[in-house]
Image (tube, rainbow, N blue to C red):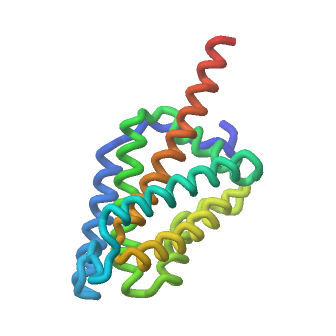
Amino acid sequence: MNEEQAQPTGFNTLPVLLFYLFMSAGAYVLATWLIDVPPWHVAEEAIPIYYTVAIGAGIGITVVAIDALIDHFFAPAKKLTQLFEQLIQEWSGIDILIAALCSAVAEELLFRGFLLPWIGWLASSLIFGALHWAGWKDRMWIWTVMATIMGFAFAAITLWTGSILAAIVAHFTINYFNMSRIATRVRQKKNKEILA
């Protein structure tokens, strides 16, 4: 097998759920222990929930559109999408939904719910980006750069709205629609191969 290719994998729900459950529980324990506030704490001056959800969805949809453009015109982004095509080619719509929802909730509880108030927006955003490291090979650094930028954006909307809800909605929207777009592309390629 070519070293550049990722192994296609079916989605295994239990490990994903356990990983993100552990991450969420860790965020809760650390936040209540170190900063004496649960990670879903809402500031007194928080924006109303319906605005918060709309802000998160709007930012998420905007980022998805920008991602699609970047993917079309920027070679490192195309390479990253090809890697994801290989990784999620056997995932169903439910698999994508579970992965997007679990990652959005757990990562926002940890990074914006706990780390943001504990170590600040700069450090929490840089750590978020660093943990999305995919390596220098084949220009995978683009995922780290994009994740770092989104870490700053998620921190900003959390501070602006007064809760992590907008960041969760934006994060979910980005993950769900980007993975769905990639999975749709994989299915279209397979259908063309079958018809050829």
Residue 168 placement (x, y as % from top left): 38, 62
Say above or below: 88 vs 46: above
In the visual, does 43 lie left or right of 124?
Answer: left
Say above or below: 74 vs 133: above
In the visual, does 33 lie left or right of 19?
Answer: left
Residue 57 placement (x, y as % from top left): 44, 56
- Front residue of 80/108: it is 108
Q: At 34% across and 65% down in the image, what residue appears? A: 165
Say above or below: 182 vs 157: above
Say above or below: 6 vs 35: above
Q: At 29% across and 46% down in the image, what residue appears? A: 14
Residue 21 placement (x, y as % from top left): 27, 59
Q: Quadrant of residue 193?
A: top right
Q: At 54% across and 74% down in the image, what residue appears? A: 152
Res. 107 visible in picture: no
Res. 179 visible in picture: yes
- Could you tell me which quadrant the C terminus lies in? top right
Q: At 39% across and 80% down in the image, what residue appears? A: 115
